[in-house]
Image (cartoon, rainbow, N blue to C red):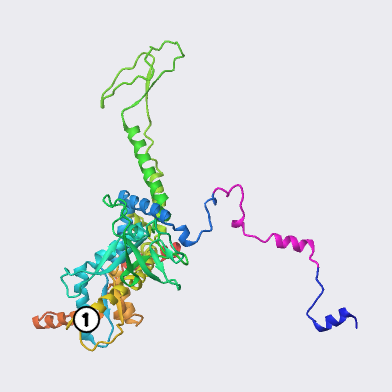
Amino acid sequence: MTVFGWLKHLVPSIRPRRELSAGQIMRAVRARYDAAVTTDENRRHWAAADGLSANAANSPEVRRILRNRARYEVANNSYARGIVLTLAHDVIGTGPRLQLLTSDAEANRRIEREFARWSKAVGLAEKLRTMRMARASDGEAFAVLTNNSRLPSSVQLDVRLVESDRVTTPNMLPLRPEQVDGIEFDAAGNPIAYHVLKRHPGDSSAGMQLGYDRIPAESMVHFFRSDRAGQARGVPDITPALPLFAQLRRYTLAVLSAAEVAALPGGVLYTDAPANGEADSIEPMDLIELERGTLMTMPGGWKMGQVKAEQPATTYGEFKKEILNEIARCLNMPFNVAAGNSSGYNYASGRLDHQTYFKAVRVEQSHLEVTVLDRILAAWFDEAVLIPSLLPAGLIAEWPHQWFWDGHEHVDPAKEANAQATRLANHTATLADEYARRGLDWETQLEQRAKEMNRMRELGLPIAQSAPVPSEDDEPEHEEEEEHATATA
């Protein structure tokens, strides 16, 4: 047996190398993505694309510029201000309400009452709305859990808001690999401390003071949206819409200026006579003051031509609609909510457009519960258990609970009442579900209803109850809405 045959017998998997044909080589080379090809047409469009990490892309200087520009638009652009306010009102509303789910109903009501009293004392709902607005314009919001001895409540815990400008490490201090602009992390990536400047860097009296406090992570609430893995700081929610806000303002001002110029009683003098002809000589570039509602004579051979009032253009309204629709898209907000105008909507189209928005609101409320509210509730319990007779004795360490938010009003209450009655009748929903849609506790509502019915019996008032029945007039409208909904979908 030859050496080659012995090796072939020993390692049977060895096979002679097969040469690839020219066609196979060409097919392998041609495998590509069109979007990854750089051409003369797309070279400038993708020139700003980079491969920076999340924290490098969101460097302190980049975030500072985005914050300043977003704040400027929110402060000076009526649409930007309305969109941010509407977002905060829809997500936070009048504030969350705590519902404990322990087996002790009396203890649940007592704790819920004490927490509601404390929430009102610290202005929790207002601070949450400010935090949501700050995330839209600043990219993030910070809150320090501290003590406030002047609170009119037994629990002295307070939630002190801190602007994102103050959470930073002074430039003279070099950052270690486990630090990201004011935040220290451990080896597992958990925040362990925050650097908070004693004075706002934009404060006129701050000067060159770079002193800061090191706040433990247990006492700091950091609310932001992480769009990339490893991202430690947030950017404004309206960042993609900032150029669009600027375009909207510039176009509006340009259309207004053009309309004002065209509407003024002004014009130019011109003549059809040849040079050195029969027209009277006048001083070039001379100005003539005109009065409204008057006629005037022209020099011999001269005519007056007024600027045509071609503004505002007929496309102005369509431009505003399309650009507002694009602005609101990055916030999952429908056009009629962003514009404050539902003239082009009917019931079905309004419901369809709001489904995405309400789902986004629920997602944000869930994020708030985990990131902010549960942290605040845990700190509240830590202090409340130390106060004698504030909480019931013998309570368990675990506190199963949920948060209630404001419900959303429907476009047509009658149709929603019919749908609610149908869901309850065929057992596809419960009273807890239906009351939760309105942000209410079903047990509290039923207890109140029982009191009302007992009082009505005492007064001899009738207690007639009947499920809403759809009228015949609604049937054609329902069919039209279903057809419109199918076409829109």
Q: Quadrant of residue 153?
A: bottom left
Q: Viewer-proximal residue, 180 or 15?
A: 180
In the orientation shown, which residue stands out farthest toward the left?
A: 459
Whole-percent x, y for residue 87 in the image = 32, 61
Q: Quadrant of residue 416?
A: bottom left
Q: Viewer-proximal residue, 170 or 155?
A: 170
Residue 25 falls inside the magenta stretch:
yes
Q: Residue at x 19, y 81 (%)?
A: 110
Whole-percent x, y for residue 186 in the image = 43, 71
State the SS at label 1.
Answer: loop
Q: Residue at x 17, y 69 (%)?
A: 151
Up the image or down, 122 lies above or below 293; here it is: below
Q: Residue at x 34, y 83 (%)?
A: 427
In the orientation shown, which residue stands out farthest toward the right?
A: 1
Up the image or down, 290 lies above or below 68; here it is: above
In the visual, does 327 lie left or right of 93?
A: right
The reply to whether residue 458 is in sight is yes
For badge 1, the amino acid type reads Leu
The reply to whether residue 326 is in sight is no
User: In the rendered image, which quarter contains the C terminus?
Assistant: bottom left
Q: Residue at x 19, y 77 (%)?
A: 114
Residue 481 falls inside the magenta stretch:
no
Q: Quadrant of residue 36?
A: bottom right
Whole-percent x, y for residue 115 in the image = 22, 75
Q: Which residues are magenta?
A: 19-44
Determine crowd level at label 1: few under 14, some 14-19, many 20+ residues with C-alpha closer than 10 A. Answer: few
Q: Which residue is mark 1?
A: 386
Up the image or down, 214 lies above or below 84; here it is: below
Up the image or down, 328 lies above or below 438; here it is: above
